[in-house]
Amino acid sequence: MNVLLITTRSDTGGGPKHVNDLAENIQEYHNNINLFIASPNDKPYAEHYQKFANGFFKLPHRKFSVFSLLKLRKFCKKNKISIVHSHGRGAGIYSRLLFLFRVKIIHTYHGVHKEAGYKDLAKNTIERLLKRFTSALIFVSNSELTTAESVNLTKTGHNHVIANGIDIEKIKHLKSSFNRIALRKSFNIEDNEIILGALTRLDWQKGNDILIKHFSKLLEDQPDKKFKLLIAGEGKEKKSLLKLIFKLQLSSHISLLGSIANPLEFLHAIDVFISASRGEGMPYTLIEALSMERQIVASNVVGHIDLLPEQYLFNLNDFESFSARINDIQKNNCLIDGQKRVIDICDSVKKIISTYQN
């Protein structure tokens, strides 16, 4: 079975990580599959893709190109590709057009958005046209499937919910080797500080502007507590977020750390994992925070609601809700048994491969 995975991103993010984990697991445990990957040649994942794949095709970053499509078709023909599995909206355009050349198409959405404006309407209209060329549609959470149904992006008899999985045993082993005191020192955390930490991409969808504004009010409401906010990640909104931090006079309370080498070390060092995302598919950062058994507060949106009980969720634009959740988990030392809420990568991959075979 010759399978091509397509993604138009190989930079830091949940979608590229999912492709990486899928490829690694297939290479290690499913030797009946000859794997090929088409993606941009960006860090950190492109070099890993090339290691796991029998062949690699370079695509432009988050951009559709007719020239690339024609070359990709030749690549598929040369390597006798029978199944194409695309990840994300951009990759889905390439894959569904390859349907014209008689290959089976599997598509994973990694985030479905309601039609809040003309851009969303246009994107979803294209998706509605393309879904007819798809043998299987994979949604990474039940709430994502529900959202897709509301905007007519599903296909009767062809919808599958397969949650993102992680290597649970590997994370358990790493966690047992971490020294929390040493890790907190490495992030310049003082003993009496309460660290709220976000692992995120710095763009509008992730709601970091909302998080910073809520955090500012939290400091005003509770001046006796030494709260500090650490945000790890890169993105196009970095400058605007720095301006917001400066405007609110929070430079001594909020640090933008940029990309970090080991997210699990960061999660082990912080006290509370925070996400103010405006919407998700099935967020890896939250899954990893659960596996590390951190205290968690997250926005009440698609993706989060599949993983967390209501008492850990806050209404996105409601500071009182945010503050109440922070206070509750601090007061009661609330920890979630994350191991019961996450799925092992091997189980997730087996379900994906079943869509290739059916």
Image: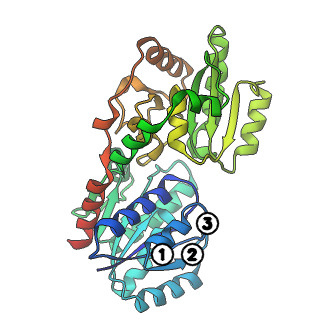
Q: Amino acid at mark 3?
A: Asp
Q: For the residues marked 3 and 2, what is the alpha-carbon distance in whole angstroms?
A: 10 Å
Residue 341 in which image quadrant? top left
Residue 358 pos. (x, y %)? 20, 71
Q: Eyeballing the image, is 286 above or below 94?
A: above
Q: For the residues marked 2 and 1, what is the alpha-carbon distance in whole angstroms?
A: 10 Å
Residue 90 pos. (x, y %)? 51, 67
Q: Which element is circle 1 on?
A: helix
Mark 1 = which residue? 94
* Residue 131: numbered disc: none
Q: Amino acid at mark 2?
A: Leu
Q: Eyeballing the image, is 67 above or below 352?
A: below
Q: Amino acid at mark 1?
A: Tyr
Q: Which element is circle 3 on?
A: loop
Q: Eyeballing the image, is 183 above or below 140?
A: above
Comparing 26 with 110, the one in front is: 26
